[in-house]
Image (cartoon, grey):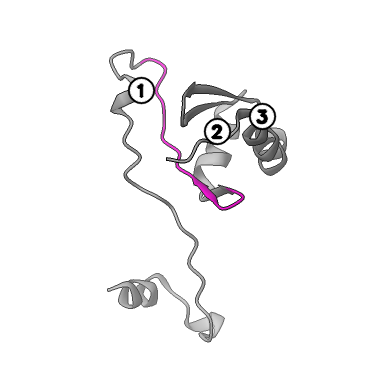
Amino acid sequence: ARVLNLQTLQQAMAKAWRSNYHGISQVSRSMFMAHFRTLEAMMFVITRQPWIMGSDNLLLDWLDPSDEAKEKEDYRFHTIYVTIRIYGVPRSFRSIQLLRSILE
């Protein structure tokens, strides 16, 4: 994993997340923790993935503060969200079924 600069990440996410940004702290060399004032602010960020900084994809995982048994090594980040753009298909024909058939 490429190492991101904490200050650069903080500035980029403050700009991207706007009023939903509260802070980011560094947990390890390549792991950061985003802090939010409200659940709504966190859900804004979680549900609007993918987030990128330059050419780097940011992989997000939910952290439950009440789950004290989970160590930072337990976070695997196996899933990445991607944006899919379909060109040449009229908007009226775009559907989840069409996307599934393309991906199969």
Q: Amino acid at mark 1?
A: Lys
Tell me the residue that label 3 is attached to: 7
Confirm whether the magenta stretch covers residue 51. Answer: no
Q: Residue at x 31, y 25 (%)?
A: 73
Amino acid, disc 2: Met
User: Looking at the picture, does residue 93 appear above or below residue 26?
Assistant: below
Which of the 4 quarters of the picture holds residue 12?
Answer: top right
Residue under numbered circle 2: 42
Dot 2 or dot 3, earlier in sequence: 3
In magenta stretch: residue 62: yes
> Could you tell me which secondary element the residue under label 2 belongs to?
helix
Image coords of residue 50 (percent x, y): 51, 51
Sequence order check, earlier mark of 1 and 2: 2
Which quadrant of the structure image shows residue 103?
bottom left
Magenta residues (range): 53-66
In the rendered image, residue 45, in percent from the top left (x then y), is placed at 56, 40
* Magenta stretch, overall SS: loop
Q: Label 1: state its secondary structure.
A: helix
Q: Circle 3: is it few (<14), some (14-19), or many (20+) Cα within 10 Å?
A: few
